[in-house]
Image (cartoon, rainbow, N blue to C red):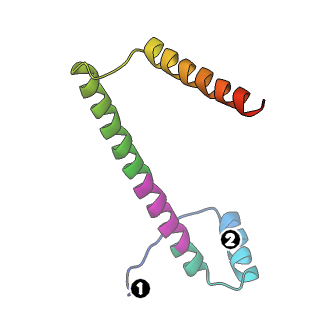
């Protein structure tokens, strides 16, 4: 990848000194470390946007299902899984006899 763009930034002299020392200690150029940090940041932002989009679609789908009457109440779901738990516990009890 071509490295022709220049990025200029202001920062505290102490931060620059510490960063340059850390880069030197890791035997890597400061520009390489900054590029990696920037790529990581861009990737995290992309993943956050993708997750937000996924969540928004999921909520929209759930709202549409509720409006269409395609849902169960919390009480119904709780009762259904209580029955399933009871059935599994009974099976375990029989298996342990």
| Crowd band around label 1 with a 10 angstrom C-alpha radius: few (<14), some (14–19), many (20+) | few
Residue sitting at x 48%, y 19%: 80
Residue sitting at x 37%, y 18%: 72
Residue 37 visible in the current orientation: yes
Q: Quadrant of the N terminus?
A: bottom left
Element marked by disc 2:
helix
| Residue that badge 1 annotates | 3
Q: Is residue 97 left or right of residue 7?
A: right
Residue sitting at x 78%, y 29%: 97
Q: Earlier in the sequence, mark 1 or mark 2?
A: 1
- Magenta region, residue range: 36-47
* Magenta span dominant secondary structure: helix
Q: Position of residue 78 (x, y in %)?
A: 51, 17
| Crowd band around label 2 with a 10 angstrom C-alpha radius: few (<14), some (14–19), many (20+) | some
Element marked by disc 1:
loop
- Could you say which quadrant of the image residue 13 lies in? bottom right
Residue furthest to the front: 97
Magenta span includes 44: yes
Foreground mark, 1 or 2, reads 1
Q: Position of residue 25 (x, y in %)?
A: 76, 80
Residue sitting at x 51%, y 65%: 40
Q: Is residue 28 left or right of residue 8?
A: right
Above or below residue 73? Residue 25 is below
Q: Is residue 63 left or right of residue 21?
A: left
């Amino acid at each position: 990848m071509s490295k022709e763009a220049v990025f200029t930034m202001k920062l505290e002299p102490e931060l620059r000194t510490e960063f340059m020392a850390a880069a030197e200690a890791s035997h890597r150029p400061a520009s390489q470390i900054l590029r990696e940090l920037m790529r990581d940041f861009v990737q995290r932002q992309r993943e956050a946007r993708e997750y937000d989009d996924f969540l928004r679609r999921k909520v929209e789908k759930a709202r549409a299902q509720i409006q269409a009457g395609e849902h169960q109440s919390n009480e119904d779901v709780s009762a259904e899984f209580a029955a399933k738990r009871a059935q599994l516990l009974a099976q375990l009890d029989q298996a342990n006899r």
